[in-house]
Image: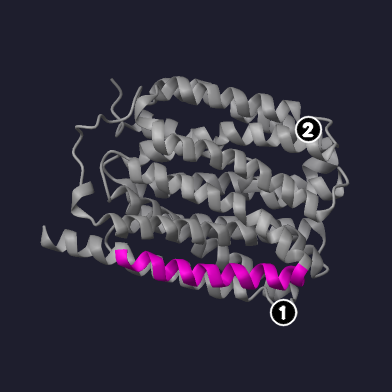
Amino acid sequence: MVDINSRQSIVAIVFLAVIGPCVFILQPGFVQGLVQILGFSEAHAADIAAIEMFGLATTTVLLSFISSRIPWRKFITLCIGLCALGNLASIGQSDFTTLAVIRFITGLGSGGIISLTFTMMGLTDRADRNFGFIIVWVLTYGGLGLLAMPAAYEAVSMNGVLIFFAAFCAAGVFFVRYLPERGPTETAESTDSTFNPSIKIVSLLAILVYNIGIGIVWVYLFLVGLDTGMTEQSVANALTISQFLGIAGAFLAVIFELRLGRLLPLAIGVIGGAISVYALVGELTTDRFWIAVCAFNFLWNLSMPYLLATLADFDRRGRMVVHGVSMQFVGYAIGPYAAAQLLGVGGYDAVNFTASVLFIVAAVLLLPGLLAQRRHHSGN
């Protein structure tokens, strides 16, 4: 038996949770490589990113129905293999259809790793803090990765970057033994009956809407920076600094946990994120790009641990976290596709304006669930 609250288990979950989105978290740089190295159009590059996210979302949706009935360790091992092989198979591919199919299959593996690791972390005793650890390490990887990508492309081109992704994913097999073999049984303690099903559905819809907005703004962020006249390395530097500010945002959840509640951090994170993304609309200077992306990443990652812990608080069997992660990555899949369509309609302004509106809608949809949880805990 594995104690899910032990240090070894939490370290293993965090490491695998970084492996799962290892391409997505570097998506602005990856899309830039598809455009500038492999010669894809901006729309086709966004489509490839979206197709990979649809693969990822497919597995997360599937697991929302079957996660309690499958062996977690064996399933994650299978997903690690898919990710490693998918990245290796992407080497040398320049045909849109072939690469899109390969990235979809790679996304299937990524989705399984992300869904189960986030579900496991939702079952720990200090979920707010532990989700903060995941976000901190994902962003540390992302910050260093975005900083290194221009130099990596220069040194080893796209093929070398794909080999790194494959090797990084394969390293996950050494951590699988520290994971729980299976999820909680149906007889596990649950707070499901405490909350109205409609409140949980609205909360899941909020997760979907919020992450469609994230997917829309994230996919073209590198190219938005280039559009200001910045060099590739300057944009990479801005995104790297923003990633480290994102670490600071997530680390606040580690420090404060529930001392500030969840309503205040989420209000600041989601509504503030809308304002920062709207700052990318209109005539964009280098300074404004820096301020907007740094504020966006800080506020996005301030909100994420609290969003995930809010879902975990709805039940102790991890089912809401599984559903929420599926909504999260369905949103990430829809976002790049929607961004590609918006780009043809109104350019980057249409992309970023739409994302900011979606953040506001998500904030409104989150409110009923947060208030219901506050009443529940104050009554106890």
In the picture, the disc for residue 238 is none
* Spatial separation of the CA atoms under disc 1 and disc 2: 37 Å
For disc 1, the marked residue is: 282
- Which of the image's four quarters has the C terminus? bottom left
Dominant secondary-structure state across the stretch colored magenta: helix
In this rendering, would 114 be left or right of 148?
left
Task: Give the mark count.
Answer: 2
Q: Residue at x 53, y 47 (%)?
A: 329
Residue 238 on image: x %, y %: 68, 61
Q: Residue at x 42, y 48 (%)?
A: 324
Label 1 or label 2, whichever lies nearer to me, is 1
Residue nearest the observer in this picture, 163 or 184: 184
- Residue 340 image-quadrant placement: bottom right
Residue 280 in view, yes or no: yes
Residue 240 in view, yes or no: no
Q: Give the amino acid at mark 1.
A: Gly
For disc 2, the marked residue is: 160
Q: Dot 2, how many residues are within 10 Å of its Cα: few (below 14), some (14-19), or many (20+)?
A: some
Q: Give the amino acid at mark 2.
A: Gly
Q: Which residues are magenta?
A: 345-368
Q: Residue at x 28, y 27 (%)?
A: 3
In the picture as drawn, the residue positioned furthest to the bottom comes out as 283
Q: Dot 1, how many residues are within 10 Å of its Cα: few (below 14), some (14-19), or many (20+)?
A: few
Whether 366 is among the magenta residues is yes
Residue nearest the observer in this picture, 343 or 286: 343
In this rendering, would 170 be left or right of 348?
left
